[in-house]
Image (cartoon, helix red, strand yellow):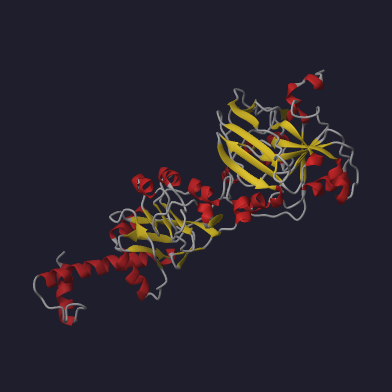
Amino acid sequence: MTDDSTDNRFAGLPGRPGKIVAIHLSYASRADQRGRRPAHPSYFLKPSSSVAPSGGTVERPDGTELLAFEGEIALVIGTAARRVPLDQAWDHVAWVTAANDLGLYDLRANDKGSNVRSKGGDGFTPVGPGLLDARAVDPDALRLRAWVNGELRQDDTTAGLLFTLPQLVADLSQHLTLEPGDVILTGTPAGSSVVVPGDVVEVEVDALDAPGAPSSGRLVTTVTQGEHRFDHALGSLPAVDDVQRAEAWGHEPAPARFQLTPELREKLLQAPVAGLSAQLRKRGLDAVTIDGVRPTHPDAKLVGTARTLRFVPGREDLFARHGGGYNAQKRAFDTVGEGEVIVIEARGQAGSGTFGDILALRAHARGAAGIVTDGGVRDHAAVAAVGIPVYSAGAHPAVLGRLHVPWDVDVAVACGGTTVEPGDVVVGDGDGVVVIPPALVEEVVDATLAQEEEDGWIAQQVAAGHPIDGLFPMDAQWRARFDAWRRTR
């Protein structure tokens, strides 16, 4: 038997825990990302053999792809708790520290929520490195942050919990005895995502309002590649689908949207925005132009289907909860598809940037058709150098948080005075940007190209010296001449 007192796996804890209880959904940001807010907490168990110390490694098994990190606040029970009231629950917690509730989404399907295989692997519960005295911190004022390769991915506080930390202790104590040394993993906020071999994940918990801001220190885990595959003769094998991929990467699958065929896209590239606008007006649609935006590349044509990103007005407490980590802005740029246009609602507020060169590079690398924002752009020259078509209200040096909180993706947004729904067709040129309902695209572009041909012929006649009267618009005589010309083509 292993001597637990010298077992390095438990270096971040007082000893080997009798049990580890984890909660499924507890942060509002994570619940909203998943599209469901539970009315009550629900739990699963992790084996103590999954515990690992700071500075260790976690193996992604061979043949799998969706190992995801989850930064969490861990509570360590100090005195036994059985049916304790809410106002006494925190008295049974001795320490607070950081944890990483790693999970392998490839193995989730057959466990039906128990997470035995997907979250029970060796090294899947790093904890530590330091223990915070629970008596010295306010459970409602703890901050949780997680980094991947030095980039902040999660940043939330216990103010964002759906269920308070004392409530979790009291609720669990209704059902089972919490014993000294037991660990409660209290859930993860938005920002959890997939990590790959070579990635380094760091998690830290600190106290926001305690003197000196005591911290757990950074819990460090390096992902490695495993060499052994699962044996199909013994049990179910890893399996993934679009739902598992979307949840592992941290976003819901995008709804099915209108797809532009190559032929239709080519027609739209030939059609001027002014002509499209005129045809939409003939069909009773006037409020379809995105006003107040100008192109970084006036000679470049923009054609694509809309992916939308919504910012709400800046508020410090909301930005603290929604502005950090893998927020809505990053999710939009990280998931935009080939031929799609990111359309940003910034309420016409040009007094801060709504994105900069790094995000423009990400969109360009993913094959996005362009970006439209009725707010400002930081690093304007660098964004222009990326080469992706961008329409904005102009350059501004201030960061996003000066005016905006990234709030939601793939919802109807208001940009430049018009409403844009995900899947709408967006076309831009030197005259501006127009939004076309998918059901009207083919009709409108065909009518626009036909009108362009007619207008081109009229321009030739005017250039040849013919007067405008009767020619523009054409009377019956000129119409007959035009129709005769068309028959010869």
Q: Give how far across and how far down residue 167 sits, in percent.
A: 81, 49
Location of the N terminus by quadrant is: top right
Q: Is residue 454 above or below residue 87?
A: below
Figure quadrant of residue 226: top right
Please give the name of the residue rendered at 62% of the width and 23% of the height, measured from the top-left corner. Answer: 228
Observer-nearest residue: 113 or 322?
A: 322
Decide if residue 82 is on the left or right side of residue 444.
right
Q: Give how far across and how far down residue 325 sits, in percent.
A: 58, 45
Observer-nearest residue: 321 or 265?
A: 321
Q: Is residue 214 above or below residue 40?
A: above
Decide if residue 273 is on the left or right side of residue 67.
left
Q: Give how far across and how far down residue 236 sits, in percent.
A: 67, 34
Please give the name of the residue rendered at 52% of the width and 63% of the height, measured from the top-left corner. Answer: 412
Most extreme residue toward the front is: 211
Q: Give how far across and how far down residue 193 sits, in percent.
A: 59, 41
Location of the C terminus by quadrant is: bottom left
Residue 36 visible, this orientation: yes
